[in-house]
Image (cartoon, helix red, strand yellow):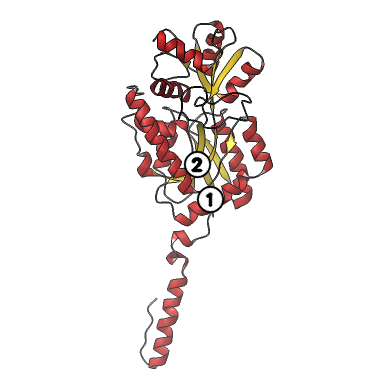
Amino acid sequence: MTISFAGCTRGVRRLVQVSGLAALLLSPFSIPATQAAYPDKPIRMIVPQPPGGFNDTVGRLLAKRMSDAMGQPVLVENQPGAGSQLGTTNAARSPADGYTILVVSFAYGTNPALRSNLPYDTARDFTPLIFLGQTPNLLVVSSASPYKSLAEVLDYVRKHPGKLSYASSGVGSSPHLSMEMLKSMAKVDLVHIPYKGGAPMATDLLGGQVDIMFDNTPNLMPYVTSGKMRALAVTSAEPSPYAPGVPTVAQAGVPGYAMTAWYGLVVRSGTPAEIVEKLNTTLNAILKEEDVRKVFAAQSVEPVGGTSKQFGQFLDGEFTKWAKVIKDANITAD
């Protein structure tokens, strides 16, 4: 519509102009997206692993709590494939609007060094959201093993390099890289025997086909408490309440050693800072809920929380640490 100012006084013309400008500024089309109410539609949470693991458990747990807290559905999408690359790639290609959240874990910190052809750039394409939690790996031998401590294992392999074998759940897995870091820091040599999961490697350890292994603490503690396996050390910097009485690797003979399997959330880089802050605040509150902490404890996972910046600093350390371990051991998953 065209407004004619013919015959209008100067004051009337001025009033019409100001009114028109005000209407334009108040138009919903002129409000920047970062100022619009968030969230005003469903949020999706991508889990780049199949159902069943803790990535999926924590994703669904948080999705329900976030839906209640934020007044919009949070829908979990399992997108497994290519060592978590499929779901991660889809998240990297999503809009930077806070409506796609990615569940990340240990592989997120190691894939940049393990794989030369990732279809996304971890540092460029994502913004850290929150550090959810972490759990140590446990170093075990069969109860029939002659080794009663990590010090005894290290003493033997230094005198007999390449004579002991260790199991892992695959190249680049946290059990594999836990041992490669131990080998590097302790300057010892053990033979790697990769498996397609934790159950078959535990079976072969008990059967004497392999000598020693790391795995996530909740996977191994039932064997330890039943007396079938002997726990030698945990990988965390401090002793773990989930493996009472078990020394850390650092205490047991490798000073400075520390690693954990961990879980977190990220969003697409470029997501408005106020949306990142709102999500982070909401999630920190959820992590303090008693029933949420019980779910974490049942999986031997310690809740962490904190700011987006703190999670980013942790990730920077992971990228640096594992890039060195992977390069020194000449490991590739291509």
Say whether marks 2 and 1 touch (CB < 8 Å): yes
The residue under label 2 is 265
Q: What residue is rendered at 43% in x and 62% in y?
A: 32
User: Residue flagged by tag 1: what amino acid is it?
Assistant: Leu
Q: How many marks?
A: 2
Q: Position of residue 233 (x, y in %)?
A: 54, 22
User: Residue flagged by tag 2: what amino acid is it?
Assistant: Leu
Report the disc number at residue 311: none
Q: What residue is rendered at 53% in x and 18% in y?
A: 198
What is the quadrant of the C terminus in the image? top left
Q: Height in image: 155 above or below 269?
A: above
Q: Height in image: 264 above or below 97?
A: above
Determine whether the residue tagged by mark 2 lies in a helix, strand or loop.
Answer: strand
Circle 2 crowding by C-alpha within 10 Å: few under 14, some 14–19, many from 20: many
Q: Is residue 133 visible?
A: yes
What is the quadrant of the N terminus in the image? bottom left
